[in-house]
Amino acid sequence: MKGTRLPRADNSGMKINPFTWKQLDALVETIRKNSDPFLADVILVLGYTGLRWGEIRVLKVRDVQLEPVMRFLVKASQTEGMQIKYPKSGKARHVPVADKVKPIVLEHLMGKEPDDLVFTTRSGAKLNKGNIKRDAHWKKLSHGRRLHDLRHTAAAEWLRHGIDVLTVKEWLGHSSLVMTQRHVHYLGTDADIDALRKLNR
């Protein structure tokens, strides 16, 4: 039994509760006005790029490609209190940066060296999830969503805007297409209507 490889856990039933980008924009604007524009920046970037929390914490300036399009080279992750993790395959992934958040990223790059972190606290420390949620009043404003639902937000909106599921899988860094397809199932009726519209043309 020692050498037996167990199958991966089935996370297909995991709850997905994304924002729409319209809802996210409204939330971010509230945080920007009533709390801290810096916190609003971080939350918006998460919701438009699908980065994991641990990934945005260790994203370095050298990992931001500016030309011909802005992309993040995502190759490490670190949650609070843990060692930095790298993909077991050793393979990094590229995540495109939408025009909506490109000016925010450029602002956070200003005056920094290649090995500096892109997003830090105002004092230059690594981001802390607990502090972000507290200072942004996340519990009050998110209507029961987790910060991780910002990743689901990006995935669902990419699919809703017509990005094919295989491309979304690569952008998210999913090891299995099954994980990405959870977002297709979540879209449900809207996706079905859109598909039928194409079939009936």
Image: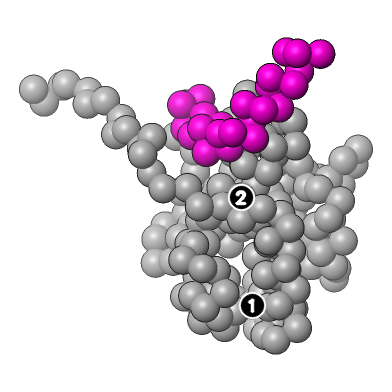
Q: Kindly state the secondary structure of the residue where label 2 is placed.
A: helix
Q: Residue at x 49, y 75 (%)?
A: 139
Q: Residue at x 47, y 47 (%)?
A: 16
The numbered disc on residue 163 is: none
Compared to residue 190, the image places residue 23 above or below, namely below
The magenta span reads 177-201
Q: Quadrant of the N terminus?
A: top left
Q: Kindly state the secondary structure of the residue where label 1 is placed.
A: loop
Q: Was residue 36 drawn as part of the magenta stretch in this picture?
A: no
Amino acid type, callout 1: Thr
Reading the image, the residue beneath label 1 is 121
Q: Quadrant of residue 24?
A: bottom right
Nearest the eye: 165 or 80: 165
Crowd around label 1: few <14 · some 14–19 · many ≥20 (10 Å): few
Compared to residue 35, the image places residue 63 above or below, namely above
188 vs 43, left or right, is: left
Compared to residue 55, the image places residue 135 above or below, namely below
